[in-house]
Amino acid sequence: MRPLDRTDARILLALDDDPAATVVALAERLGLARNTVHARLRRLEADGALAPPSVRVRPGHAGLPVLAFLTLAISQGDADATIAEISAVPEVCEMHAITGDGDLHVRVVAADNADLHRVTGVLLGCTGVVRSSTVISMVEVVPLRTAPVLAALTR
């Protein structure tokens, strides 16, 4: 994994301002060669630095406005199979192995609280899940963002 540099950050911030900008438009705006912008974007995609476009979709617009975070305790016997089974649940948006009281931190979405109850039940039914603790997001105060980090790289 190669860290982003100042030029990468400038290109990505310009795409934040205009996601549909062409390589030519980005090059003109940033005072860079078209080939430089094109090569940088291809490298960022190949390196995995850019998330898939679907990550930009806000779940509420897909009819899933309830956001919750579940901490799951799992049996350690076959964690890979458990993680694969949890990953197959469509409402699971993100999952991290964590330290502390649980083993996995899972971000899920649901249509309403009753649907969240259903999703939680599905996760509890996954092989190896021992227990769960759920926290429901009341309101998104600061959305997921990386622009401030990228802006700091441009200085």
Image (cartoon, rainbow, N blue to C red):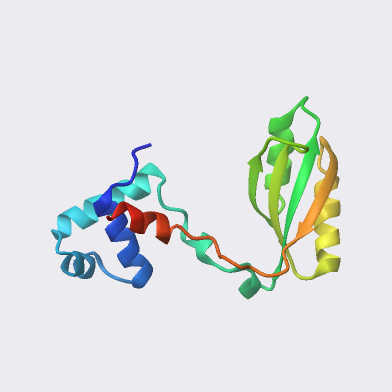
Relative vertical location of residue 101 with respect to residue 30 in this rendering, above or below: above
Residue 20 occupies quadrant? bottom left
Relative vertical location of residue 111 with respect to residue 46 in this rendering, above or below: below
3 on left or right of 89: left
Which residue is depicted at the point 69% across and 35% down?
99
Relative vertical location of residue 117 with respect to residue 18 in this rendering, above or below: above
Q: Position of residue 130 (x, y in %)?
A: 86, 38
6 on left or right of 137: left
Q: Position of residue 96 (x, y in %)?
A: 64, 42
Closer-to-camera residue (136/18): 136
36 on left or right of 133: left
Which residue is depicted at the point 41% across and 52% down?
50
Which residue occupies the extreme top position in the image? Answer: 77
Task: Tell me the quadrant of the picture where the C terminus can be found.
Answer: bottom left
Residue 34 occupies quadrant? bottom left
Which residue is depicted at the point 65% across and 46% down?
95
Q: Position of residue 68 (x, y in %)?
A: 73, 59
19 on left or right of 78: left
Residue 48 occupies quadrant? top left
Task: Tell me the quadrant of the picture where the N terminus can be found.
Answer: top left
Q: Position of residue 22 (x, y in %)?
A: 26, 68
